[in-house]
Image (cartoon, rainbow, N blue to C red):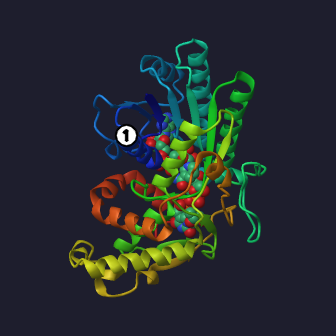
Amino acid sequence: MNLLVTGGAGFIGSNFVHHWRGAHPGDRVVVLDALTYAGNRSSLPRDDDHFLFVHGDIRDAELVSKLLRENPISVLAHFAAESHVDRSIHSPETFLDTNVTGTLRLLEAARGYVASGGAPADFRFHHVSTDEVYGSLGPEDPAFEEATPYAPNSPYAASKAASDHLVRAWHHTYGLPVTVTNCSNNYGPFHFPEKLIPLMLVNILHARSLPVYGDGMNVRDWLYVTDHCRGIELAIRKGTPGEVYNIGGNNERPNIEIIRTLCSLIVEEFASDPELAARFPDCPAAKGSDPLTLVTHVTDRPGHDRRYAINAEKAKRELGYEPQESLASGLKKTVRWYLENEPWWKAVMDGSYQDWISSNYGEAR
Ligand code: NAD
Ligand code: DAU
């Protein structure tokens, strides 16, 4: 089988490529990625008989049609997006361009491919979306279900909601065989250090302040990225065209608790490996002090959603999906990965990364 993975050089896309190649070594994976600041060629394998990287934009309809036709593609797995809520608050237009227009162009290319008769009979367009389209929950509200009304609150969430509606409409109107997964917060390897968990890890190691938005009691439902990739694979293989599946981790935690856990894990790692203190001499753990002292409460994110939680019962019932990683084991693996892959995160923290950190958090950091 040939897959086209958009956004495959990003965090979840690259983990999905590694996961799929491990599970289906005979398949061929083509990645289409524009390599924005969030995309890294080094997160992916080298080109070979089973893997091809194409540097290009999902809005380039001609290129997408050519890739679908020439390979020929059975599954288009659509991950490409502008994905960072804070950046969407600073520059919303890019989010509309990529997330809405980009998805539209892919849908149109896929429709043309199917209509031409060149697509395999079991062709599938799988759209990767987010729980943020459902809005924000109160402390006692039930978790998001697939039928929960859409109420996106940030420019990012609004652009993802619009893209979900397009995917739904292309199925309803044109019969395009689509599936959609809406997932909670992922964490794990290859996560760009602008999002909460990798940002905190890198800052702890360098003794930089840990910027907590508001009171730190916003709740997210954390999912180890490989579990998300398994959920997407199940939706592609077993999902019914036209259906939506929520994927979650059953791990609701306030941000401050996640940060506390990361600090403790770093202290444990430094205690068991004396070389870490030599590699990261500024880290409080290298000097026997608690990295939690680095926490700084900063101005809250505008419109900050208070709580997300996913009800993944439908995916469990219909696809056999269940997360395998606990939060404790997933966070431990993640901490180890960042300690063992310093060259990866050092390389992505270039000049444009520093500019973003300054503009979002102020020059002081
Ligand atoms: P990411 O920002 O790490 O990666 C996005 C990738 O898309 C990058 O490689 C980037 O270069 C590429 N890209 C951006 N614009 C492009 C364009 N116009 N053409 C081609 N490629 C382009 O994002 P992520 O965290 O891996 O998220 C992947 C998908 O999963 C997104 O659709 C996101 O909305 C969704 N999602 C993310 C999470 C999460 O916790 N990160 C949770 C649920 C859903
Ligand atoms: O819920 C799924 C979504 O999760 C995905 O659709 C998005 O693509 C992904 O970026 C993520 O969005 P969040 O806004 O929840 O993730 P982020 O890592 O940016 O923030 C997680 C929480 O931590 C959130 O409540 C804001 C808070 N935060 C974040 C940063 C970067 C801080 O307190 N300080 C920070 O410096």
| Identity of the residue drawn at 27% across and 57% down | 343
Quick check: 49 above or below 253?
Answer: above
Q: Which quarter of the picture shows residue 189? A: bottom left
| Identity of the residue drawn at 63% across and 76% down | 215
Tell me residue 70's x, y (percent): 43, 17
Q: Give the class, few, some or many, for how many residues have Cα within 10 Å of label 1's Cα (few <14, many ≥20).
A: some
Left or right of 282 on screen, residue 139? right
Tell me residue 161's x, y (percent): 69, 44
| Identity of the residue drawn at 54% across and 22% down | 61
Quick check: 35 above or below 54?
Answer: below
Q: Nearer the viewer, residue 100 or 129?
A: 129
Tell me residue 223's x, y (percent): 53, 59
Left or right of 157 on screen, residue 42? left
Residue sitting at the far right? 149
Q: Which quarter of the picture shows residue 45? A: top left
Quick check: 85 above or below 212?
Answer: above
Q: Which quarter of the picture shows residue 138? A: bottom right
Quarter of the image for the N terminus: give it: top left
| Identity of the residue drawn at 58% across and 31% down | 125
Disc 1 designates what residue?
A: 21
Amino acid carrying mark 1 in the image: Arg
User: Is the CB–ligand 1 distance for label 1 below 8 Å?
Assistant: no
Tell me residue 127's x, y (percent): 59, 38
Residue sitting at the far bottom? 288
Residue 100 in view:
no
Secondary structure found at label 1: helix
Quick check: 179 above or below 92?
Answer: above
Q: Which of 206 and 126 is in front in this view?
A: 126
